[in-house]
Image (cartoon, helix red, strand yellow):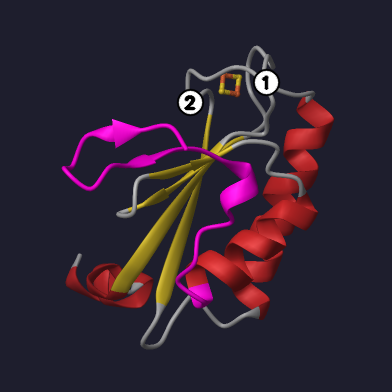
Amino acid sequence: MAGQVERLGLAKIERHIFLCAQQSKPKCCSFEDSTESWVYLKKRIGELGLTQGKRVVYRSKVDCLRVCAHGPICVVWPDGIWYQRATPEVLERILQEHVLGGRPVSEYVIAAPAEDGDQAEP
Ligand code: FES
């Protein structure tokens, strides 16, 4: 167990991206579009060296994030920033500008924590 935990870099996870993809009932976008986004996200996280080392970014495919419109929908934790229309192009911006640069991609944000800790829409 400890070896697997270390191999996965669980203690070094900086961010975790959840993407609505390959849904059992596609509602926010087509199955094909979400698959394209999922494949792209996995590939780019690997290419950017974010699967191991100091900065580890996890990605998980989820069946539905309950927004069900203008997808693919994704959310970046622990920031609590929700995005719409997470196409490969938008995911690239999320990786470059938000994950690596620390600045959410505001034009695609649909919800983010407010200053007082409540969730707020932009
Ligand atoms: S099907 Fe994507 S958020 Fe519900």
The stretch of residues the image draws in magenta is 100-122
Few, some or many residues within 10 Å of mark 1 (<14, 14–19, 20+):
many
Above or below: residue 71 compared with residue 87: above
Q: Ligand 1 falls in which quarter?
A: top right
Where residue 21 sits, quadrant-wise, is top right
Q: Nearer the viewer, residue 115 or 24?
A: 115
Q: Nearer the viewer, residue 8 or 4?
A: 8
Q: Mark 2 highlights which residue?
A: 65
Q: Mark 1 highlights which residue?
A: 28
Q: Is residue 106 magenta?
A: yes
Is 73 situated left or right of 85 in this image?
left
Q: Earlier in the sequence, mark 2 or mark 1?
A: 1
Disc 1 C-beta below 8 A from ligand 1? yes
Disc 2 C-beta below 8 A from ligand 1? yes
Identify the residue at image location x=52%, y=23%: 64
Secondary structure of the residue carrying numbered label 2: loop
